């Protein structure tokens, strides 16, 4: 029971932290989509076998780097994190079939994260 509550809490946290509050997801440039597809294929097997502890470490590492004004992630690094976080939603959907819709929405949200938006966020941090 505690594990399920933890999963739901993380799902809520992921949605709450989201910068994109639009009902529709943004369409990424084709080059970014190709990069994401490549990263997804590379990481899928590894991420689907992640434990919650490994996912927590990945998730908090991403937000620590994202919010550190001294660190600027490359496009590949940025999408590597967001694709891995999105891929973990596939694992949650398999573990909790009744949460498939939430997991699919979460995956779509993370895959719609834009590197351009990240760069704008970093520029606003410098001000």
Image (cartoon, rainbow, N blue to C red):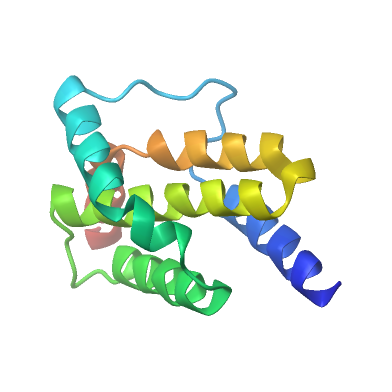
The residue furthest right is: 1
User: Which residue sits at x=46%, y=76%?
Assistant: 54
The count of marks equals 0
Instruction: Tell me the quarter of the picture where residue 38 sits.
Output: top left
| Residue 53 as seen in the image, left or right of residue 78 | right
Q: Tell me which residue sits at (16%, 48%) in the image.
A: 75
Which residue is at a point 32% across and 57% down the rendered structure image? 81
Q: Position of residue 15 (x, y in %)?
A: 61, 48
Residue 119 against residue 114 in the figure, above or below: below
Q: Is 45 placed above or below 61 here? A: above
Residue 67 lies left or right of residue 5; in this view the side is left
Q: Is residue 81 left or right of residue 107?
A: left
Looking at the picture, how far across and down is residue 41, in whole percent? 27, 43
- Quarter of the image that includes the C terminus: bottom left
Rendered-image quadrant of the N terminus:
bottom right
Vertical order, 101 against 28 (above or below): below
Q: Position of residue 13 (x, y in %)?
A: 63, 59
Of residues 67 and 112, the one drawn nearer to the viewer in this rendering:
112
Q: Position of residue 96 (x, y in %)?
A: 73, 51
Residue at (44%, 42%) from the top-left corner?
110
């Amino acid at each position: 029971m505690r594990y399920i509550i933890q999963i739901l809490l993380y799902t809520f946290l992921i949605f709450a932290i989201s910068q994109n509050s639009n009902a529709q997801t943004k369409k990424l440039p084709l080059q970014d989509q190709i990069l994401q597809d490549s990263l997804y294929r590379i990481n899928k097997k590894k991420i689907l076998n992640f434990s919650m502890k490994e996912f927590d470490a990945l998730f908090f590492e991403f937000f620590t780097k994202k919010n550190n004004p001294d660190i600027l992630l490359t496009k590949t690094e940025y999408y590597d994190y967001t694709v891995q976080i999105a891929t973990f939603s596939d694992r949650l959907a398999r573990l909790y079939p009744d949460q498939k819709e939430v997991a699919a929405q979460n995956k779509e949200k993370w895959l719609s994260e834009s590197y351009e938006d990240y760069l704008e966020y970093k520029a606003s941090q410098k001000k």
